[in-house]
Image (cartoon, grey):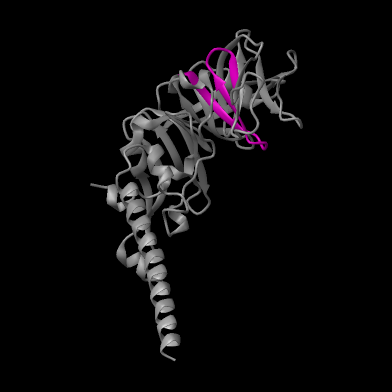
Amino acid sequence: MKKAFKVIGIIVIVILVLVGGIFGFRKIKEVTMNNERRNAKTLMEYVKTHSYEYVDDSKDEMSFRGKDLKCVPLKDLKNENIKGVIRTYNETLIILLDDSSYLSLSLDNEKIYSNNQNCNKIDTKIKVKDIKKYKENYYIVSDDNKIYYIIINDNYEVAFEEMQTEYDLSSYILLKDDVQSIVELDTASNIGIVLKNDGSLYKQEYNANYNSDASKVIFSIKKEEIFLPNDEYGNILNAVLYYDYDKKEYEIRTLVTDKGYYYYGEVETEECVKYQDIKCEKKILESEIYKKFSKDIKYIGDNYTILSDNSIIETNYLTYSLDKDLRN
C-alpha cells in the first residue's frame, strides 16, 4: 500500500512539474511576444508582431500579402516612379512605372519567373506621355494623344486596348494636361471631380454638343470650383470619394497626400464603445500608423501598399488604430 501511494505521489509530482513547465513556457512566450510587439521599430516589424499569433482581437490582426520578394527593379524604385498598382486574381500585382514599362510581381514565392525573381519588367511598347486614373482604373496617354485602357485577360496577361474617344467625356478629361485623375464622374449630369497637378480636387461641370460635320461630341468646361484645396491636408496624390445620399454630395473616403494618409472613420470614446445608444462621431482622421512609420512606406495604392523592404500589405491596415503601447 505504501508503495502504491509512493508511486501515485511521484506521478502527481511529475504531472505538476509538466503542467507547471507548460504554463511557464507559455508565460515566457507570451511575455517575449508582448515585448516584441511593444518594441516594433519599423512597419515591417509592426505587421509581423500583429499577426494572429500576437494579437487576441481579429480587428487588430495584420499579415503580409507578399514577403521576402526578390525583385531588383522594385528595390530601386521611389514613390514618384510608381504610377499605379493593379491587382489581379492569381497572386500577381501589375505595377505601372514612369518609364513606359510595368512590373509583373508575383506575391507567391513558389511561383517565380525564369529570371529567378518574383518580378518581370516588361515594356508596354507604347510611347507613354502619362498614366492617369479614372476611379480605380488606370489609362495610358501616349505621345500622340491616344488613350489606352489596361486589360488583364483570362490568362492574367496584360494587354493595352485603344479607346474610342469621339463620344466619351472621360477621354476629354483624361487628355487634359493639368488633370492627374478622374476621381468621380456622372455622365448623366456631366459633372465630375478631378485631381489636378496642383494637388487640389476640383468639381467641374461640362457642356456637350454634337458636331455633325466632325461626327463627334465637342466637350467644354461650363463651370469649375475647388472641391478640396491643397492647403487643408497637403498636396493630394490620390483620393477616393463616396456619395452621401442623405447630404446629396460627395464625401472623402481616403486621401493620400504629401503630408499623410487620411480616412473617414469613427472616433471611439469610452462612452460610445460602452453604450449602444451613443453613436461614435465620424470624421476625417489621420492615420496613426502612417504617421509613425511613414519612412517605411514606398507607395500607397487603393488596395495594396508597398513597403521599403519590398513587402506588400493591405492598404486598409493604415486605418487601424496604432497599438496603445507604441503611441508614446
Residue range (magenta): 81-103
Residue 289 coordinates in the image, percent (x, y): 36, 42
Is residue 33 shown above or below 129? below
Asked if residue 208 lies left or right of residue 306, the reply is right
The residue at 35%/63% (across/down) is 24
Is residue 251 shown above or below 53? above
Query: Of all residues shown, which one is farthest toward the bottom?
Result: 1
Q: Main secondary structure of the magenta part?
A: strand
The residue at 29%/44% (across/down) is 39
Residue 281 visible to the viewer: yes
Residue 220 visible to the viewer: no
Q: Quadrant of residue 188?
A: top right
Q: Quadrant of residue 281?
A: bottom left
Residue 10 included in the magenta stretch of the image: no
> In which quadrant of the rendered image does the N terminus lie?
bottom left
The residue at 75%/30% (across/down) is 155
Residue 96 included in the magenta stretch of the image: yes
Residue 299 coordinates in the image, percent (x, y): 45, 29
